Image: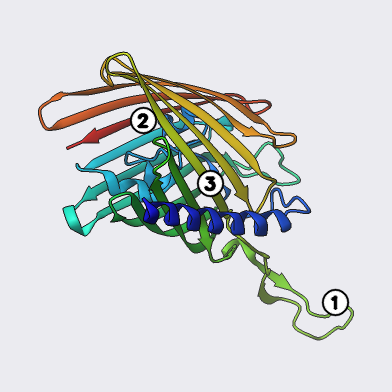
Amino acid sequence: MFEKIVKFSVLILISAAFISASASAQSLSKTGTTAAKFLSVGVGPRANGMGGAFSAVSNDVSALYWNPAGIAGLNRFETIFTYTKMFADINLNYFALAMPFEDFGTIGVSVTALDYGEMEVTTELDPEGIGMTFSAGSYAFGLSYARYITTDFAVGVTFKYIRESIMNSSADGFAFDIGTIFQTPFWGIKFASSITNFGTKMQMTGDDLLVRYDQDPTTSGNNETVDAHLATDQFELPLKLQIGISREFKFLKNQSLLLAIDANYPNDNKQWVNIGGELKLFSNLIYLRAGYKTLFLKNSQEGLTLGFGLNYEGLGALGLSVDYAYQRYEYLGDNHSFGIILRF
């Protein structure tokens, strides 16, 4: 018991230090100042249906996005594919696979792809298009590892390669996530902390930035057509600290209610809180979910989330979950997420 209390106290102190540093750095809002913002779009309809309050829940393969420490508790291979329909014909796809290897720990791989679709090339003289199209996309490829350090304390880390491209230009970067989950000795409460997208800055380069340049237009006789590249600024990744707690309440027979709260401290916005719940019915066959995102964030465009899921384990060694989530946005329309998890 004493060791558990010490661990919990250390986690609280570390979290408080990060929170204090984040709060002191947020005297001014830095909204819209980071690259690869698609990394902040939550994946997985289960977590999204719970309002994104998932860092201390994270007990399936979608933990690879929310808190990599969560895959340490898996005892079967799990794979997930999710599809989120967003505004302006933008789609977010996510695939992940988690592979537990007993005492060695659990390895995971993940791919995130944001597809903007084909767009018309326009100019000042041809605002309706010139008959050509271009594409843009954002991608992240992750490799994760997690394991239990003790019977009640798990640690996980993810290393990511990130790439964003538009027409003939692109930007690349590297980042890592690190997370912990601690089963506290207090009333069945789980405590979690995670830091995501800590890494390099990203800078757009490519042929689209190649221009002809006259170094001194006031002088005649010099070379007026020097090839040059426009220099773009470097932008940080959307770094975020999450602190979360969760607890499951059992009632009747084979029914339970899971409640979770996450505090979020990003480097490109003010702080906010997500809350969510998941009601499990009929021996974990049906799941009903609800949540609320960005509480206490001024001028927030997000809010209510809802979701449901079906889980079936009657396929021998194969398990199947199908999930859906609805997310409300004030001006950009509603988002709909769909996902499938296979366990084998």
Three-letter amino acid code at the position of disc 3? Ile
Which of these two is toward me, 202 or 215? 202
Labelled pair 2, 3 in contact (Cβ < 8 Å): no
Tell me the crowding category of disc 1: few under 14, some 14 to 19, or many 20 or more residues within 10 angstroms, Cα based: few
Q: Residue at x 76, y 78 (%)?
A: 224
Three-letter amino acid code at the position of disc 2? Gly
Q: Residue beneath label 3, please?
A: 243
Q: Residue at x 87, y 83 (%)?
A: 219
Give left or right: position of 319 versus 293. Answer: left
Report the disc number at residue 110. Answer: none
- Percent x, y of residue 234: 64, 65
For the question of whether residue 135 can be seen, the reply is: no
122 over 248 or under it: above or below: below
Tell me the crowding category of disc 3: few under 14, some 14 to 19, or many 20 or more residues within 10 angstroms, Cα based: many
Which residue is the extreme one toward the bottom? 221
Give left or right: position of 109 versus 273. Answer: left
* Mark 1 element type: loop
First in residue order: circle 2 vs circle 3: 3
Q: Residue beneath label 1, please?
A: 217
